[in-house]
Amino acid sequence: MRILILILVLLPLSGLYAQEGNLHISVKDPVTMDGLSNIIILVGDQRLTTDDGGQVSATLPYGTYNVIINQDMYAPYSEEVLIDKPEVDLAIILDRQAGSDGGGIVEIELSDEDLDGGDNGQGVNSLLHASKDPFTNAAAFSWSAARFRARGYDSWHSSTYFNGFSMDNLETGYGSYSDYGGLNRIVRYKDSYESNKPAPYSFGNIGGVTNIMSRASQIRKQNQISYAATNRMYNNRLMYTFASGLQANGWAYAFSISRRWAEEGYVPGTNYDAYAYFASVERKLNENHMVGLSIFGAPHSRAKMGASTQEAYDLAGTNYYNPYWGFQDGKIRNSRIRKAHKPYAILNHSWKVNETTKIHTSIGFMKGRYGNTRLNWYDAPDPRPDYYRYLPSYQDDPYIASLVEDYWQNDVGARQIDWNRIYEINYLSKLAGNGANYIIEEDRIDETKYGINSYFTKDGGEHLQLSGGVDFLSHNSQRFKVVEDLLGANYWVDIDQFAERDFPGDEDILQNDMQNPDRQVVEGDIFGYNYNFHTNRAKLWGLGRFYYPKVDFFTSAYVSGSQLWREGLFQNGRYPDNSLGDSEKKTFLNIGVKAGVTYKYTGKHYFDVNAAYYTAPPMITNVFMAPRISNKFVPGIESSSGFSGEISYIYKGERISGRVSAYQTQFFNESDLFGFYHDEYRTYVYMTMTDIDRMHQGVEAGVEVKATKTLSVVAAGNLGNYRYMSRPTAYISFDNLSQPDTSELIYQKYFFVPGTPQTTGMIGLKYFHPKYWFFSVNFNYFGDAYLAFNQERRTQLAIENLGPGDELIDIITAQEEIPGGYTLDASIGKSWRINGRTIAINFMVNNILDNKELITGGYEQRRFDFDTKDVDKFPPKYYYAFGRNFFAMITINL
């Protein structure tokens, strides 16, 4: 709070010291080193064009400015430059375009005088946020096949803005790329700050923050069409993008449309159909005001792939066996379909108050839907083909087991959903006048989100820049089930089958909605559960950045308030007095502070230290004991907190550039919820864990060496240690009330955080020919990854009746490590200019060596045999990385 007050006090004084400096920019090709003419450069609010020698100059007030270049045949360039003296030279070398969408590494080239300036007592160029370094590129692309997460952080530890409006989901913390997937040409222009680095538009997050800059005036003028073929999730992608740039009359327009589709992706049974659209218009009202509106969305439908046991993979003869589909009338039908469409509208206003002060405001609104279908059944055999009772390992008789094995290996029908049998059973039930035994249901989340983010930037003279703002979000969702397909039946009875079995004489307790008892639902009807989540958050933040000849530093803080509650729309029979209407409204007050120092030893050598502390409200999805049917909160729910620190050495030379960072982050008092079917109690169970502490520490490094003007060597690596540091309490609630709510202590201290390799490495070559073709190759290694584990196997109950020293204790409680692996990737491309038009062809192959044994993740099943203690009865399920796969694209600028 003191930091916020200090910033507000300094704000009116800082304008008294405004000075101006001349920025001289030169832009060169990385291979020929020739100056590039007619390059459009955005510097803050100014639009500059290079002359025949690739140079341009502008006079600007002291402060920091975003420098953005988007040019055909070159990778996007985004950098900050500090104007803190009368004359500032900026020499830019653009990278040749490489990869499917022109992404690549860019750099600032500094003269020898700039690089050595610290040795003669003059100021050294400040180390400002830069384009992706070799490590960041490896984390985003080379290691993505193994589901690498930088520093082991979850996605909610990073924040994303779109034209200044927050894309984060307040209910889950996740920001979903699928909300704007397919808009590659639009979302490629980003202003990113990693880890605790200061950003001018947000306090940020412990894992970094990104603003996608897609206002019409920010998108490079273009008229482009592209087509891509691939054998990954989809097979085809068609995209068209038009942008006018900022015209002389003050208007700018941009729009983009695309489609991605496949009858079947890399994994059998996975069809894909996705569209995307974007439209933006912006108007420069005068020299001080610009307003704009952007609308975008990405409706999509795709069939899902499921993890399975190694036994099922071996029986099927492939690690890409998918249990979610089967043949119906000779056609593939998948039971798990994901459908989503979340259209956004974002209104922007930029106000240049004076030469040193600007205010940017974004108002956003989203209303959309997200759903996943699956099979449900009542009083009928389990339709899942890889159900453990249908596998050879379940059979006690070796002869029966051999018959089952032969059936699995030689009859595809044994391995897939038997749709014809499902329809037959439903038809017989229909003839008897009964309801459905099987249906397809859709778990739906219909969301409404709106908010405002308004922030200012203030250049306070040679040494100071201030920014701060207010960020408000409101997120509301209706969560329910809907009957998607009755599969030939007439209706489905809306009761809880588990409660009906355990309480046969109680007509009330089995009702999902007591206000509509024994309701017969048909396709399109809501049933099962129905409730709203409401979450509001307001945040006030401020940032001060200070620049001096040898040292830069920053300090930032925020204070936020959050409110959340549940609103039940069904009166559930298990909680008749605590399910309908509003729950108690929980409020949380949270704070955060961060600071950092950069020591500029010379223009080549930088040392950077930063640290952050924050508290955060719990996610609403983790605070209710049985969120689908009750307003009951988990006992003692509180805010979580975290502390993060890192120290980095950065080298920025003419031929060598790189970074090495050591980091440590502590997370305290986090919570998490799991829902699963419990075999012992034969009902759906909710397990909410509280008091989860984690430690994430490690070293990450990346380096690029320019062996020649055309050939570079890149390398990156990460050595991490991500562990749980507490024994959390698990609160357990039984959906059918067959057991009272209970709690267990989970013995997971020092377990590894699952879901990401903790050791990774990459080494590669990049070659760019003067005739605008390129080639790159990378070798990648992944190791020290662990499966997600079943917390119930780490309780006293799991090892009950086992004596000290019993070897079963270690077998039951040990965490499974995933074997390490590797991939080899390569790409090649060529660009041409023909009659003023640009044509580019790119071809990439990942996993060239066709390594099909690379496990990317998985989980222990929630089932455990508490009687026999046999961990092999319910073995873990795995996901495998795709084998050899490709992406080929042709792009034409019309």
Image: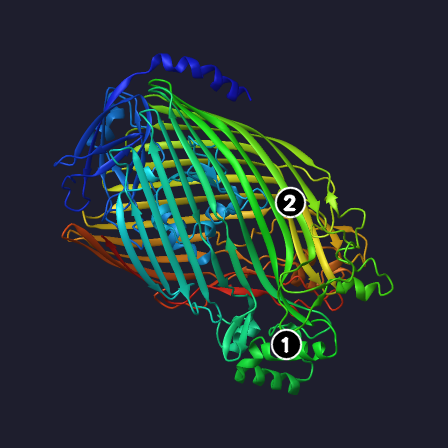
Q: Is residue 219 left or right of residue 784?
A: left
Q: Residue furthest right?
A: 505
Of the residues shown, which amino acid type is indicated by label 1? Ile
Measuring 29% from the left and 16% from the top, which residue is drawn there? 19
Residue assigned mark 1: 422
How many numbered marks appear? 2
Residue 694 seen in render: yes
Q: Is residue 519 left or right of residue 443?
A: right
Q: Residue 508: x percent and y percent? A: 83, 58
Q: From mark 2 to mark 1, how far is it between C-alphas?
A: 35 Å
Figure check: 883 above or below 68? below
Residue 670 seen in render: no
Determine whether label 2 and label 1 are within 8 Å by CB. Answer: no
Measuring 73% from the left and 41% from the top, which residue is drawn there? 583
The answer to which of 607 and 533 lies nearer the viewer is 533
Q: Residue 213: x percent and y percent? A: 37, 39
Q: Is residue 52 left or right of residue 485?
A: left
Residue assigned mark 2: 533
For the N terminus, the image quarter is top right
Q: Residue furthest left?
A: 52
Judging from the image, what secondary structure is the residue with disc 1 in?
Answer: helix
Identify the mark nearer the N-term, 2 or 1: 1
Query: By what rule are the colours in the image chosen?
Result: rainbow
Q: Residue 604: x percent and y percent? A: 28, 33
